[in-house]
Amino acid sequence: MILIVDNYDSFTWNLVQRIGELDHTLEVRVERNDQVSLQEIESHGPSHIILSPGPCDPAKAGISREVVRHCAGKVPLLGVCLGHQCIGDVFGMRVQRHPLVMHGKTSPIHHDGQGVHAGVDNPFTATRYHSLVVARESVPAQGWAVSAWTRDTLDDGTTVEVVMGLRKVWSEADRAAGLCAPLEGVQYHPESFLTDAGYRILANFLELQPTTDRAFGGRDHALAR
């Protein structure tokens, strides 16, 4: 079963539709971010978890950050837009206002060709709906990969690199503790029809498998705030 934590955003249902189009036999369960507990999520026993986009910031995203703290490394987890920002926030990265408001705009997205971006054109065009970003300089040098990025030209003509994707790189200590399931975030919207590779990206995520049978067991990640 695929669990989507809904951060009160209409794009949540685009995610549901896209997953159904990929495989109509998959069970997709949607839970509002203020109407489900961690215990209920555990009882659902999801194979994958998606944190949806949303109109707010991570501090107002209900249970989303707790889901990251508790489930990171135990179940494959993908954060989309606000969900991506929640991942960054939980692991100590800085979520800040972007100088440009990117609502309904498309950009070329460059990536490292791994994880959810395996087999995806490089660059590809993706849709963006956000005013916040994970600050590039706040991404830890160890334990994380900037898996996707774009470059924006600001009003003063300067160009800045913007984080469009994050991937957790689990350490040997993490793996020994049973924390090794894929954890990725994307700032753009793979579920948008204007995102060229959206189906491939979501399919890649659904194909990611935990490399441990200790789902939900053991400790939460020690570095998660």
Image (cartoon, rainbow, N blue to C red):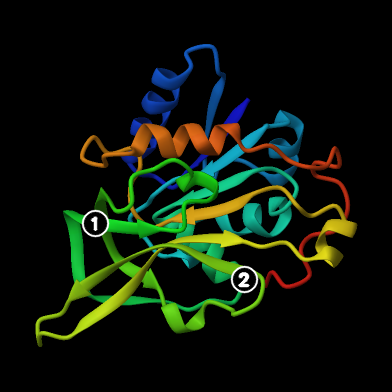
SS of the residue under disc 1: strand
Mark carried by residue 91: 2
SS of the residue under disc 2: loop
Observer-side mark, 2 or 1, equals: 1
Residue 159 falls left or right of residue 42 = left
* Image position, residue 79 (x, y; %): 50, 51
- Residue 175, picture quadrant: bottom right
Which quarter of the image is occupied by the C terminus?
bottom right
Task: Identify residue type, mark 1.
Answer: Pro
Residue 180 in sight in this render: yes
Residue 33 in sight in this render: no
N-terminal of the pair, mark 2 or mark 1, is 2
- Residue 131, picture quadrant: bottom left
* Image position, residue 5 (x, y; %): 52, 42
Q: Which residue is mark 1?
A: 108
In the figure, 72 relative to 211: above or below? below
Residue 122 falls left or right of residue 85 = left
